[in-house]
Image: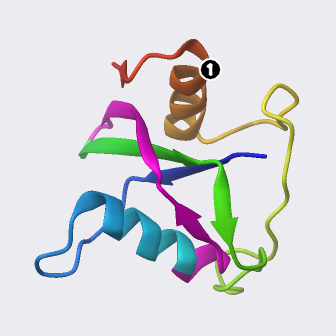
Amino acid sequence: MIGLSRLSTLKPDLGEGLVSGAIRETAEETNLVPANPGLVSVGNETGHDAHFITLGFVSKQFKGELKAMEPDEITEWVWFDLYSLPGPMFPPTMKMINNYKSKRILGE
C-alpha cells in the first residue's frame, strides 16, 4: 500500500523544509506519519484568478492509524487501488496520480 499526498496549500512553519512540512501536514490531516516521503509530482495549476505549484509526495510506509483528524472538512479516509480510483477527482490530484503512474515528475 502506498500513500499519495497532494500539497497545494502547504504553509511551512518558519524554517521548515518541504519534506518535513509534508510529513507534518499528512499527520495533522490523517493521523499517519509517512516514512521517507519522496517527491513524485510537480504540477503547474492556473485558474481564472490564481496560480499554484502543486507538489505530490509518496510514501510506502507509515506509522499510526488512518483517521479523519479534521471532521469538519473530511469525514473519512478510504484506501483505493491505484488503478481503480473513484471519480470525479480534483484535477490537480488526478494530474499528480497520472505523473506518478507514468514515472514523470513535471505535469504542465
Q: For label 1, count other residues whose C-alpha is less than 10 Å away and answer few (under 14), some (14-19) or many (20+).
A: few
Helix, strand or loop status at disc 1:
helix
Residue range of the region highlighted in magenta in the rendering: 28-48
Along the horizontal axis of the image, is 57 left or right of 19? right
Picture residue at 88% right of the left edge, 29% below the top: 84
Out of 71 and 83, give the one closest to the viewer: 83
**Location of residue 11 in the rendering, given as x and y in whole percent from the top left corner:** 27, 71
Question: Percent x, y for residue 36?
Answer: 47, 55
Position of residue 55 relative to residue 7, above or below, is above
Q: Quadrant of residue 35?
A: bottom right
Q: Quadrant of residue 100?
A: top right
Per the image, the residue denoted by label 1 is 101
Location of the C terminus by quadrant is top left
Residue 30 image offset from top left, x and y in percent:
65, 74
Residue lying furthest left in this view? Answer: 15
The residue nearer to you, when weighing 88 against 34, is 34
Q: Residue at position x 79%, y 66% from top?
A: 77
**Is residue 63 shown left or right of residue 85?**
left
Q: How is the image coloured?
A: rainbow
Q: How many marks?
A: 1
Q: Does residue 70 lie above or below 54 as drawn? A: below
Q: Is residue 30 magenta?
A: yes
**Image coordinates for residue 55, horizontal then vertical, percent:** 36, 44
* Relative to 3, residue 34 above or below: below
